Image (cartoon, rainbow, N blue to C red):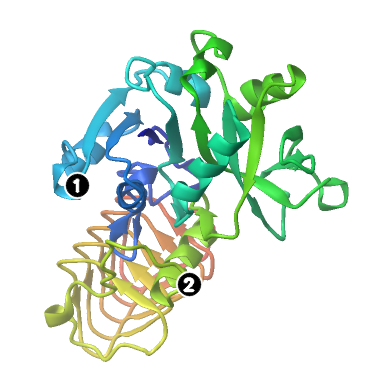
Amino acid sequence: MKAMIMAAGVGSRLMPLTTDIPKPMVPIVNTPVMEYCVRLLKNHGVKEIIANTHYLPETITGYFSDGKDFGVNLRYSYEEELLGTAGGVKNNRWFLDEPFFIVSGDALTNINLTDMYKFHKEKGALATLALKPVKDVTQFGVVVTDRDYKITAFQEKPKKSEALTNLVNTGIYIFEPEIFEYIPEGFYDFGRELFPKLVELKERIYGYPTQDYWRDVGSLNVYKQANWDVLNGNYILEGIEVTSIKSEGLVKSKLSSEKVVIGKNCIIGKNSKLKNCIIWDNCIIEDNVVVEDAIIGANCIIGEGTVIKPGVVIGGGSIIGKNVVLSEGVRIEAKSRIQEEQLITSANL
């Protein structure tokens, strides 16, 4: 089996965190989300992988290289102009010459790919979509199946009262190479174009329902929750060693028992209070700082006495002066400079 990881996304809903880093490289408890994808594939015997790239591709290729350190063979397909989900896959038809998986590079999941492939073969499917029941369907593509799990309809982000099921498309697929006959050249999308077309043609498109863990790490709230899920053991993946604090010798404050993630090469000064927060690599948090329920991007400096309130997100490379107060929900753009003793209340700076 081969696989393609969809890794071309910009991650606009994760801004300002993704100003200098593509969405697949956003860290979940100090490990890029795409690494979880790579290791999941390897765990199920899928070692021949290609990933499409577009936004800041060197960040991805520089980290994973040829994949050997992760136990796989990893190739890349750069898209100067985005080709859409289906178009990006067809662009790699030369590589995907046998039944293959598609996995989103921004999905945190431990779905049983072995069982999914068995289901795919038993159904004689052309395409199999992994489906997950969720409470709120309004942000997802809803999928309707018959009793044999053959897909009969799609609903794109329906109102809760109008949703025909609570099963949503996870972005994890298995295709036979025959699928390329249904995808035209150029920009083409799975959800809006290919899948409805397959249903209309009454083709062999099936839904594989799963109760396994899955989160689309596409928004700041989901990103935060994904970190807590890894920390508290709600998400476990063989081969991933979870290290929530990578700068232990440089943390001079007693940390709260609440959830805290600290990246590598960080310095945390004395008498600082950190609670429910995620701090990326290479940050300096000076003395007497309060950080609660916030996310701080890489390479930031937070001045002495500063208070960072819940919901704050600080883009990478920012310098916050002494005794600053960042009010709830404030978004600080990457590489911002905030002078000391200010109260920042605007939603974006």
Residue 214: mark in rendering: none
Q: Which of marks 1 and 2 is nearer the N terminus?
A: 1
Residue 94 is drawn in which quadrant?
Answer: top left
**C-alpha gap between disc 1 and disc 2:** 25 Å
- Residue farthest top in this picture: 185
Report helix, strand or loop for mark 2.
Answer: loop
* Residue type, label 1: Gly
Q: Name the residue under label 2.
A: 234
Image height check: is 122 above or below 260?
above
Residue drawn at x 51%, y 28% as measured from the top left: 175
Residue 332 is drawn in which quadrant?
Answer: bottom left
Q: Where is residue 74 in the image (x, y as percent from the top left)?
A: 23, 35
Report helix, strand or loop for mark 1.
Answer: loop
Q: Where is residue 5 in the image (x, y as percent from the top left)?
A: 38, 36
Image height check: is 323 above or below 36?
below
Image height check: is 170 above or below 220?
above
Residue drawn at x 28%, y 63% as measured from the top left: 240
- Residue farthest front in this picture: 122
Instruction: Give the crowd class for mark 1: few <14, some 14-19, many >=20 residues within 10 Å.
Output: some
User: Nearer the viewer's eye, disc 1 or disc 2?
Assistant: 1
Q: Mark 1 points at which residue?
A: 71
Residue drawn at x 24%, y 29% as measured from the top left: 75
- Tell me if residue 294 can be seen: no
Given residues 59 and 339, the one toward you in this image is: 59
